Image (cartoon, grey):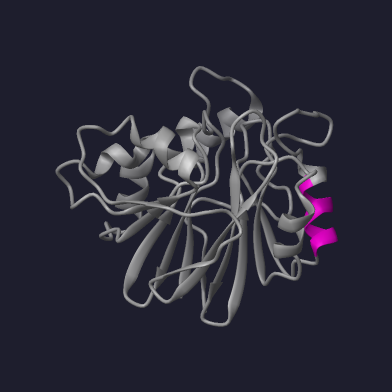
Amino acid sequence: MRLTLLGTGDAVGTPKIGCSCPRCIYAREKGVSRTRTSLLLETGGHHLMIDTSPDTRCQLLRAESPVIDGVIWTHGHYDHYAGYGEFYRVQPPPPVYAVPAVLSYCSQFFTFLSFDKHPVQPYVPFDLFGSTFTFLAVNHPSVPTYGLRIESEGKVIGYTADTRADIPMESRTLLEDLDLLFIDAIVPPEIHLNKHMNYEEACSLAHSLGARSFYCVHLSHLIDWDLPCLGRDMDHWDW
């Protein structure tokens, strides 16, 4: 199994267009970036994308152009599904798995594509390519948003790209004692938002859940490049 962080940025990415903050200047000078957050899972000879960001085309090119066998959508914000249109005339559009309300909302923007849609209820595990996935509700007002518990080849991974810290207890239970956790940390500690966690809140939640390893994702251009536990585009883990 291989996990690859295709992207680690928030909705606008880093560098932000037209921005002259120190983080964006550094990104342009060093040729680094945070494309919008998505995750690639390779297992059993198959490739699965978790969220299809607007940067899907460049992300898949950097990942050596794998054929994608399935897609999971976590919620209906454009930076998590809009890139699905990049499959047009590239490969057969892969089947999509999502909670019914999310699947219905996102699918309406891709009427030019014919693809299989698989509604999945929260907290009901489903098997795909030899791995087991469970959607778990998180708290990201004002749209229905879900994290994932992934069980694959003896490892358990959690993914919560957009959420506040106050997630439902049933979801917390599914995120406890993970081998690896990806967690939303959009802004530095001095900023507090209603829809996301800051870096300090994310690290605190990860420690309270007992994750053996965790990486912050969905990072804005306000996050410094040298903080500990930050995910970086194209980081990968092999098991």
Q: In the picture provided, is 89 more to the left or to the right than 194?
A: left
Q: Residue at 34% of width from left, 58% of height from top? A: 70
- Image position, residue 71 (x, y; %): 38, 53
Q: Quadrant of residue 41?
A: bottom left
Q: In the picture provided, is 126 more to the left or to the right than 166?
A: left
- Which of the two residues, 209 or 18, is positioned nearer the viewer here? 209
Q: Is residue 165 magenta?
A: no
Residue 188 visible in this rendered orientation of the protein: yes
- Image position, residue 80 (x, y; %): 47, 39
Q: Is residue 203 magenta?
A: yes
Q: Report the magenta residues as a range.
A: 202-209
Q: In the picture provided, is 163 more to the left or to the right than 80?
A: right
Q: Residue at 28% of width from left, 53% of height from top? A: 94
- The total number of labels drawn is 0
Q: Quadrant of residue 114?
A: top left
Residue 31 visible in this rendered orientation of the protein: no
Q: Residue at 35% of width from left, 38% of height from top? A: 83
- Image position, residue 120 (x, y; %): 47, 54
- Which of the two residues, 204 or 129, is positioned nearer the viewer here? 129
Q: Is residue 155 above or below residue 91?
A: below
| Farthest residue, direction left | 89
- Which of the two residues, 11 or 78, is positioned nearer the viewer here? 78
| Farthest residue, direction top | 18
The dominant secondary structure in magenta is helix
- Image position, residue 63 (x, y; %): 35, 57
Q: Residue at 27% of width from left, 51% of height from top? A: 116
